[in-house]
C-alpha cells in the first residue's frame, strides 16, 4: 500500500506535463482503491488470477510504453511477453542487503522513493512538480457517520495498526501518549488491532474513541483527512495521510525511513521519532518479533515528545 501511494506523483506529472498521453495503472485488485478515483488515469487494470490473461489484456490495449515501478519477476515477465518498450525503476537490492546485514547505513540513498520513481520517466522530459502524493476519497462522508459528537471538532488521528509487530508501539506506550494529549483521540486500524484498541480505551476513558475494525480503509482515510494532527507507524494509512498535509508524527521501530526512502514527503510539519540503536534496521518491512528480544526501538520511545507535538 505504501509503495503504491508513492507512485501517484509519477502519474500526475506524466498527465500534466504530457497532456495528450493516456495512462493506465496496473495493480492487484486489493489495491485498486488507491487509484479508482484518480482523475489523471485513463483506465485502471487489475492483475488477473492467470498472468497469461493479464498479458493478453495488456497486448489488447496496444500500449506504447510500460513504466515498471515494481521490478519483480511478474513485471519482468509482462515486459518480455508483451514486447512493449519499457522503463524500469532501479531497485538498490545490494546496498539495502548490506545495510540490513552489516548496518552500513551510509550506503542508503538520501532520495525519497517518489524521486526514485520519477527517474523512470525523466527520459520523457517529465520533472518532479514537488507536490505531495495524491489520494481521492471515494464518497462524500460525514464525521457524524463514524464519530460521536465529542470527537467531531478537533481531534488527533492515531493510526495504531501495522502489518508487523516490530512496527507497532506496545499498548502501554500508546496509552502514555494519549494521556499526554489535550485533545480527543481517534484510534484507527483494522480488526487485527481491535483488541489493542479496547485495552487503550479502557485505560484512558472517553477521551479516546476507537474506529478499529469499524471502518474500511477509504473511510479511515476520510477520518485522517479531517484530523487536526496525525500519529502513526510505518504503515500505509500513515503514508496516505501525507496527501492531506496534516502535521504528522511518524514512529519507527525495526524499520527505518531512510532504508525505504519513505520519510514524510512534501508536508509542511512532520516529526520522525526513532531510536538510534546499532541493531536498527533489523528488517526492510518488519518482523513478527524483535530478533534480539529486547524491542528497545519501540520500548525506549520518548512518548512525551510525541504528545507535546500533537498537543501544540
Image (tube, rainbow, N blue to C red):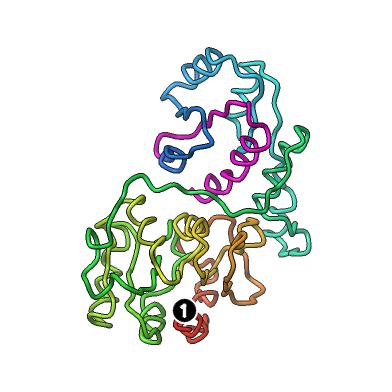
Q: With respect to residue 283, does 85 lie above or below? A: above
Q: Position of residue 286 (x, y in %)?
A: 52, 59
Dividing the picture into quadrants, the one containing residue 17 is: top right
Dividing the picture into quadrants, the one containing residue 189 is: bottom left
Q: Position of residue 181 (x, y in %)?
A: 39, 84
Would you say residue 21 sits in the magenta stretch? Answer: yes
What residue do we see at 51% from left, 72% from top? 249
Q: Which residues are magenta?
A: 1-30
What residue do we see at 58% from left, 44% from top? 7
Tally the marks. 1
What residue do we see at 33% from left, 68% from top? 187
Q: Is residue 153 left or right of residue 87?
A: left
Q: With respect to residue 42, does 55 lie above or below? A: above
Label 1 SS = helix
Q: Position of residue 180 (x, y in %)?
A: 40, 87
Q: Is residue 84 left or right of residue 149?
A: right
Would you say residue 2 sits in the magenta stretch? Answer: yes
Q: Position of residue 71 (x, y in %)?
A: 64, 36
Q: Is residue 212 left or right of residue 39?
A: left
Q: Which residue has dot 1 on it?
A: 310
- Badge 1 local density, few (<14 within 10 Å), some, or many (20+)? many
Amino acid at each position: 500500500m505504501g509503495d503504491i501511494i508513492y507512485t501517484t506523483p509519477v502519474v500526475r506529472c506524466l498527465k500534466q506535463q504530457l497532456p495528450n498521453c493516456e495512462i493506465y495503472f496496473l495493480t492487484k485488485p486489493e489495491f485498486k482503491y488507491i487509484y479508482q478515483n484518480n482523475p489523471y488515469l485513463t483506465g485502471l487494470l487489475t492483475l488477473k488470477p492467470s498472468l497469461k490473461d493479464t498479458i493478453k489484456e495488456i497486448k489488447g490495449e496496444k500500449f506504447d510504453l510500460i513504466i515498471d515501478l515494481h521490478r519483480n519477476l511478474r513485471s519482468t515477465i509482462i515486459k518480455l511477453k508483451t514486447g512493449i518498450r519499457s522503463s524500469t525503476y532501479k531497485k538498490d537490492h545490494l546496498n539495502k542487503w548490506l545495510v540490513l546485514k552489516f548496518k552500513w547505513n551510509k550506503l542508503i540513498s538520501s532520495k525519497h522513493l517518489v524521486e526514485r520513481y520519477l527517474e523512470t520517466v525523466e527520459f520523457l522530459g517529465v520533472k518532479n512538480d514537488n507536490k505531495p502524493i495524491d489520494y481521492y476519497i471515494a464518497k462524500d462522508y460525514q464525521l457524524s457517520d463514524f464519530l460521536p459528537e465529542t470527537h467531531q471538532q478537533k481531534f488527533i488521528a492515531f493510526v495504531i495498526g501495522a502489518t508487523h509487530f516490530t512496527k507497532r508501539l506496545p499498548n502501554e506506550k500508546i496509552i502514555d501518549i494519549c494521556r499526554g494529549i489535550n485533545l480527543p483521540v481517534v484510534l484507527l486500524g483494522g480488526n487485527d488491532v481491535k483488541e489493542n484498541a479496547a485495552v487503550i480505551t479502557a485505560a484512558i476513558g472517553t477521551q479516546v474513541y476507537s474506529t478499529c475494525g469499524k471502518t474500511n480503509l477509504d473511510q479511515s482515510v476520510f477520518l485522517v483527512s479531517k484530523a487536526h494532527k496525525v500519529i502513526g507507524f510505518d504503515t500505509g494509512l500513515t503514508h496516505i495521510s501525507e496527501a492531506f498535509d496534516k502535521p504528522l508524527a511518524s514512529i519507527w521501530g525495526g524499520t527505518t525511513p531512510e532504508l525505504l526512502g519513505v520519510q514524510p514527503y512534501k508536508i509542511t510539519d512532520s516529526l520522525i521519532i526513532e531510536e538510534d540503536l546499532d541493531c536498527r534496521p533489523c528488517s526492510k518491512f518488519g518482523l513478527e518479533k524483535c530478533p534480539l528480544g529486547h524491542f528497545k526501538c519501540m520500548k525506549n520511545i520518548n512518548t512525551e515528545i510525541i504528545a507535546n507535538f500533537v498537543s501544540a
